Image: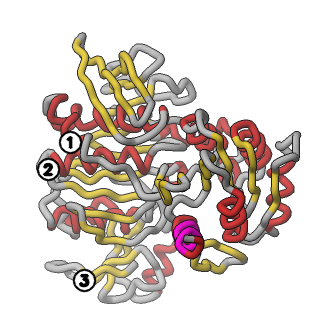
Amino acid sequence: MKHEVKNQPFKFITDNSNEADADTAFVRTAQNGAYEQAALKNGCKNVISVLDCFKVLDISPDLKIVGITGTNGKTTTAAAIYSILLDLGKKAALQGTRGCFINDKRVDEKSLTTPSVLHTLINMQKASQEKCAYFVMEASSHAIVQERIEGLEFALKIFTNISQDHLDFHKTMGEYVEAKSSFFKDEAPKLINKDDENIRYNLKNALTYGIEKPATYQVAAYGLRGGIEMAVQYAGKTYPFSSALQGKFNLYNLLAAIAAVHILEKVTFEEIAEALGNFAGVSGRMEVASSEPLVIVDFAHTPDGMEKVLEAMRENELVVVFGAGGDRDRLKRPIMGKIAAKYAKRVYVTSDNPRGEEPEAIIDDIMEGIDKKEGVFRIADRKEAVIEALRSLKPKEVLMILGKGDEDYQEINGVKQHYNDKETVQAFLKAKN
């Protein structure tokens, strides 16, 4: 990434040694340090650190960085915090799985959940230029291990939860937990989900939230029928909140967002409650693709994520379409199959992003977790699986399409081909009607 700068002895900065030259400073990071000599051989005269970039890019020292990590809930929690801050009249930026947004405008397309540290710093520069007070970002476990957040000082670090995921990268749950926990070892202000016992964290400057266990911000009572109603207890007083979002998992996400904004802004709970009411959720997260019949698209692609989404809808007669990503954690595949079969009347096992694996081999792994094969169908082509599920849908049944959310592609043998679950649903229903 080559980026133009002003008022410096060089015209550009880059973290790619191949792009470094006499006019371009090389940004040395934890990831690329081994390539510094290559940059100098290319004629680069200036090597700068991540910390130097804050001055070079004129990033405001008053910009408060909020980082959210956890297996599930990062995107919705980050988006809720961002939405509430904007509704409270604050200028804010949001970076994560869905790209980067500043004051309600998209400034960067989707990329990694947490891009390279230079990419993040450039987005922070844009936020500073727009006079933002906050930069809310998702922090993935990969980024934490690979130090893609080096040099960033967080005004608040938030933990959502840990469940099985990314074991292709971390190898064991112990390593995965350690990666997440390492984010919370310092004395930065932090907000921890007290109900999740996996995380380890520095107690200094730590506040908590939860439903089951006593916490700084605790849900005293809640209802989940037709949305979310909750009473949040803080410092001996109780405050009401409501949202159109569905499911207990979103109860946690919204509670984290409420607590975070309260910590950051010291505004009243009444003001936060009013702003929360305007948050409509995130595209591809429990998104209604059709109301008649009811079809919901969700990003859930881990056993825990699937369980939470399906548990939230268990009062309905469910039909589920899902797959599992290729070249990723194989151990979770049969577990996901077992969970789908537990909640659904019919299950259509299909492809997600098969990447370099054979779709049928991935489906084989998923099927190992399903004991009773009656009502379970294998259709490797995802579009065909969604259409067949729609075609067979009976009155009162609800179709849940899981795994890809608002992604607009399928990655097959290294090629990203255009595909979107919601588009497929709406095109089929339009043609049918």
Can you give x and y, in whole percent of width and height, for residue 218 in the image? 36, 20
Q: Are marks 3 and 1 in contact (CB under 8 Å)?
A: no
Magenta stretch: give its range: 424-430
Residue at 19% from the left image edge and 51% from the top image edge: 86
Q: Secondary structure at mark 3?
A: loop
Q: Earlier in the sequence, mark 2 or mark 3?
A: 3
Who comes first in sequence, dot 3 or dot 1? 3
In the displayed structure, 338 sits above or below 380; it is above
Q: Which residue is mark 1?
A: 275
Measured as percent of width and height from the top left, residue 197 is found at 55, 24
Separation of marks 3 and 1 at Cα, in angstroms: 44 Å
Residue at 87 percent of width and 46 percent of height = 374
- What's the residue type where badge 3 is placed? Phe
Amino acid beneath label 1: Ala
Q: Is residue 426 magenta?
A: yes
Name which residue type carries label 2: Lys
Query: Visible in this render: residue 125?
Result: no
426 or 158, which lies in front? 426
Q: Is 167 displayed left or right of 56 in the figure? A: right
Residue matched to label 2: 90
Q: How far is the residue under mark 1 from the one under mark 2?
A: 12 Å
Magenta stretch contains residue 104: no
Residue 419 is left or right of residue 112, and the answer is: right
Under tag 1, what secondary structure?
helix
